[in-house]
Amino acid sequence: MFFWQNNTTPLSLQFLQISSIILMVIGFYLPVLYFLSGSNPLNPEDNFLQWSFFIDFLNDSWNLSVIIFSIYQAILSAFLSIIFGFPGAWLLTYYNFPGKNWFQMLTYLPFILPSILVVLAMVLFFGHNGWINRGIMSLLGTDEPPFHLLYSLSGILIAHVFYNFPLAMKIIADQWENISLKYLQAAHSLGAGSTKCFFTITLPLLLPSIGSAFILIFLLCMNSFAIILVLGGGIRYTTIEVLIYQLARIEFDFSGAASLAFLQGGLSLFCMAILIRRRDGRVEQTNRLKCSLLKSLKDGSPKAWLSLFWIALVLIFALGPLTAIVLDSFRKFEYGQWIYTLEWYRKIFNIGENNQFLISLWNSIRIGIGSAILSSLCGLGLVSLILHSKGRKRSFLEILTLLPLALSTVVFGVAWFNFFQKHLIGVFPIIFVVIAMHALLTCPYWIRVVLPTLENVPKQWHIESRMLGKKPLDHGLQILWPWMRKTFLIAFFFSFSLSLGELNSILMIADDTVRTLPLEIFRAISGYRFSYASAIGVILLLLSVSTFFVVERSLGYFGTLK
């Protein structure tokens, strides 16, 4: 429990708990439910979402093809992410090598990047005029790009695998390291070879983690927006997310958008329910003796050489696109050739010439800090309620706080756009609405980081504090705060990082008065100003990476999100 039983909970905490529930209900559930049940502007007597309209909408061949393709690309993306991440999980389980911790952090970088940076990195590295094609063209002496990877299904899959394979690698490796060596030793003593042991013992024990990784990555790819919007290459590769955006913001077909939102929300909730009910089936863990990769390489082990090849491939795949952003930010096409210059950085920091970047930077930082503070306060109130509750009440509160993870940020942004336009325009500055939206989107992550640490607080501390006559507030400040402050700091920076890179929801609601770094990069990419976008991308990359290293070096937030 967080402080004491409910009857002695300080009034300040009770106020925070009530305020958090009100913010969650009014800020998240009210706009979404209002959007799904709102009246149609073309027919005010009808609601957006009607069963007959929903059936007719699903019977449309175009809408059905969009839904099928959304599921298809998400399944492929999840499958390929696991295939690419599986060797990494094996490597982390069986080998030690110099710089292993740094290698792990570098491979995690793609997952924490804002989606718009991933889009920019893909275009610069894998695009028609990207670094791969240019390198091969220079070797072959041709002017025709040999690979056409982007603006098709292949572009979507490459970006999704780049974004999600670290997650698959992490989830599977954590389970793999929990498998006791006694199972394998017993199998070997019965004459089973390494291959048979893998397929009859190791793989079945890994299936829960593989299933969890697949469902989680499937959910993330179903809700992917910026990657599909830019790299999809046209209407043929439209997904549910993109179609919701087109229907609500371009065609103003709120009935169609509501129908798709309802369908996607149902799919997401189904995936979340599977994840919540999942049991890892963990087995007894023993200290696994890991081999030295360098020694195995000297001994000529084929597995070690394959591991080295995989490490090189991952470093190219993970760092190559990010390096392309940095290099492109220093390039300018002038007099028929590319030259390296600092002009783009001079331009973005020159207030007299172009202050849009500085405005975007200032907005991103204050939105990030504001939403992280609000997310922390809201999360503190909700997590204290969860810890005070038991049984069905606790399950209900956990579902209440996790639902924002299941709903698409595009749907959330569209719902808030509709609600803001009808009720709040001219009442509240839109930047305060954006801060509240980001806080609600990051609050479930804040809770997921903090809750496990709070549950590990020794119960004896509460008993001893009572025996010493300490008040609940004194117990919280003098005992719990020293224990929890590192976790609170990690949760705060994680929330800040997520808000800093959020594009989907703000793209739905923001006007020219609220420009952020992701939004500025998106507009620059749309206008084919890639070097300008790269210069801004480097700043956003530095902010994201520095936040990641602060959190990772403090505790390792990937470990807290398991």
Image (cartoon, rainbow, N blue to C red):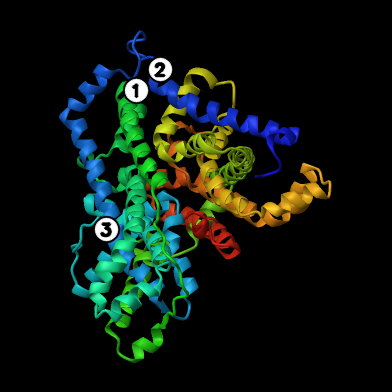
Q: What's the distance in space between the residues labelled 1 and 2, CA to CA? A: 9 Å
Q: Nearer the viewer, mark 1 or mark 2?
A: 2
Residue 496 visible in image: no
Residue type marked 2: Gly
Q: Position of residue 516 (x, y in %)?
A: 51, 43
Q: Nearer the viewer, residue 478 or 361?
A: 478
Look at the numbered discs 2 and 3 and tell me whether their residues touch, using CB distance below 8 Å. no
Q: Position of residue 480 (x, y in %)?
A: 71, 51
The tag on residue 254 is 1
Q: Position of residue 354 (x, y in %)?
A: 53, 46
Q: Position of residue 529 (x, y in %)?
A: 38, 50
Q: What's the distance in space between the residues labelled 2 and 3, CA to CA? A: 40 Å
Q: What's the distance in space between the residues labelled 3 and 1, CA to CA? A: 35 Å
Q: Which residue is mark 3?
A: 80
The tag on residue 542 is none
- At a point 41% along the width and 39% down the height, the residue shown is 406
Q: Which residue is mark 2?
A: 38
Secondary structure beneath label 2: loop
Q: Is residue 41 above or below residue 243?
A: above
Q: Is residue 233 above or below residue 65?
A: below
Residue type marked 3: Leu
288 sits left or right of 393 in the view: left
> In the figure, residue 284 lies in which quadrant?
bottom left
- At a point 57% along the width and 37% down the height, the residue shown is 435
